Image (tube, grey):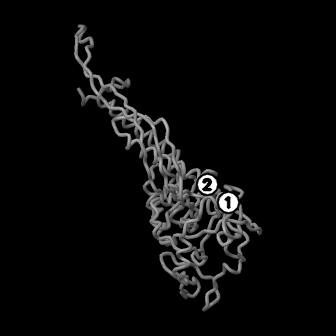
């Protein structure tokens, strides 16, 4: 799409409008004018939330209406691909704070079908982050000061894949059941040998086989390499019931990252998670006290996917030459982040603990550390 299609001038003063988190309208920061976001027709909403055929997606055989040309910039620091929705030509990477000059080319991507709009404002997200940072032990004092006085958080829509599948699995294995036997043992007690009876647990194994079935719905996989997987995956829970049809108006004033995890790689990650759940189902079906799984043969069907965007407030903080990221779930307020450690605070804590331990030893036995016993202890 052209840059002009992504401009939202205020009808009152001509300044650029911005999406108001938690609302259904755009707001002008210059004159305060509000402009409603047109509601998507029911048919368009149904199509936007419709699952796409996974096999066609993996073959790069999706309909042209499911694809889009996007303008992106690649960060030289962390490799993030940020989609550009305005006429800006230079900015800072929201993931690592590296200055970047925007590319002018476009890329063909699978179109985002739906998104969860921002609910928390920047001020609300900042308060959540400050509360979280305040709970960190041994963090540099400048970190909390940065959060209170630093620049505003960046609102960015992070790409995710969701996967659905119906599975039917046949398995073979063994069920282990505990039983107990008494045995005679000899032990030494006070220099004498005594004979005792003790109970020993043993396992009896039986062949087991059967079938399990499970339908998976919206297995969520982050499609960004710019964020550590731990941070992005632990921003849960997301209420995907709040997904709405993708509309560029929701991106007004925000940024969106283009996916850097291809569909095939995201599918492999989702399959791995599903297989882990299936193994748990098999263990429950085998029953007993222990289980051995020899084989699982799974039939996969009705595999579909969606490409969605989820809202994240983000801050990048540099300490001792290294960047640290803090993320706030723009829907629920869940906070995740990388944290720097203050060597001075840790050293001080070690000294305090050592002093307390030394003091305890001195009070109990002064001579143990080579000090004379004080008169009041006589």
Q: Is residue 286 left or right of residue 323?
A: left
Within-10-Å neighbours for mark 1: few <14, some 14–19, many 20+: some
Let me know if residue 41 appears in the view. yes
- Residue 233 location in percent, x, y? 51, 55
Res. 323 mark:
2
Q: Circle 2 sits in a helix, a strand or a loop, which is it? A: strand
- Residue 335 location in percent, x, y? 47, 59
Which of 195/291 is in front?
Answer: 291
| Label whose residue precedes the other's in the sequence (1 or 2) | 1
Q: Residue at x 22, y 14 (%)?
A: 196
In the orientation shown, which residue stands out farthest toward the top?
192
Q: Is residue 185 shown above or below 112?
A: above
Residue, disc 1: 98
Q: Circle 1 sits in a helix, a strand or a loop, which is it? A: loop
Within-10-Å neighbours for mark 2: few <14, some 14–19, many 20+: some
Q: Are marks 1 and 2 in contact (CB under 8 Å)?
A: yes
């Amino acid at each position: 799409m052209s840059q002009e299609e992504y401009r939202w001038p205020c009808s009152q003063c001509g300044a650029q409008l911005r999406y108001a988190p938690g609302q259904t309208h755009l707001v002008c920061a210059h004159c305060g004018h509000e402009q409603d976001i047109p509601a998507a027709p029911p048919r368009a909403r149904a199509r936007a939330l419709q699952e796409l055929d996974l096999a066609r997606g993996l073959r790069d055989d999706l309909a042209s209406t499911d694809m889009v040309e996007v303008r992106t910039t690649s960060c030289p620091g962390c490799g993030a691909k940020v989609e550009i929705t305005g006429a800006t030509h230079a900015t800072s990477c929201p993931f690592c704070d590296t200055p970047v000059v925007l590319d002018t080319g476009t890329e063909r991507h699978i179109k985002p079908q739906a998104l969860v709009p921002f609910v928390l404002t920047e001020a609300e997200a900042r308060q959540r982050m400050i509360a979280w940072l305040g709970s960190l032990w041994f963090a540099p004092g400048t970190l909390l000061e940065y959060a209170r006085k630093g620049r505003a958080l960046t609102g960015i829509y992070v790409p995710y894949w969701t996967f659905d599948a119906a599975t039917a699995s046949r398995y073979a294995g063994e069920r282990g059941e505990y039983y107990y036997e008494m045995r005679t043992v000899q032990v030494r007690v006070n220099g004498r040998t005594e004979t005792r009876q003790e109970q020993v647990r043993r396992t009896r194994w039986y062949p087991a086989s059967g079938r399990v079935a499970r339908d998976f719905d919206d297995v969520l996989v982050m499609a960004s390499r710019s964020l550590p997987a731990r941070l992005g995956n632990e921003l849960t829970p997301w209420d995907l019931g709040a997904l709405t049809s993708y509309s560029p108006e929701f991106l007004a004033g925000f940024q969106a990252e283009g996916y850097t995890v291809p569909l095939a790689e995201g599918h492999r990650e989702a399959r791995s998670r599903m297989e882990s759940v299936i193994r748990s189902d098999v263990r429950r079906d085998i029953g007993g006290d222990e289980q051995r799984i020899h084989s699982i043969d799974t039939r996969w069907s009705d595999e579909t996917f969606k490409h969605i965007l989820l809202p994240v407030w983000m801050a990048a903080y540099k300490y001792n030459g290294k960047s640290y990221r803090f993320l706030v779930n723009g829907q629920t307020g869940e906070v995740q982040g990388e944290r720097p450690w203050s060597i001075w605070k840790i050293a001080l804590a070690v000294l305090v603990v050592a002093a307390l331990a030394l003091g305890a030893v001195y009070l109990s036995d002064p001579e143990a550390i080579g000090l004379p016993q004080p008169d009041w202890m006589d």
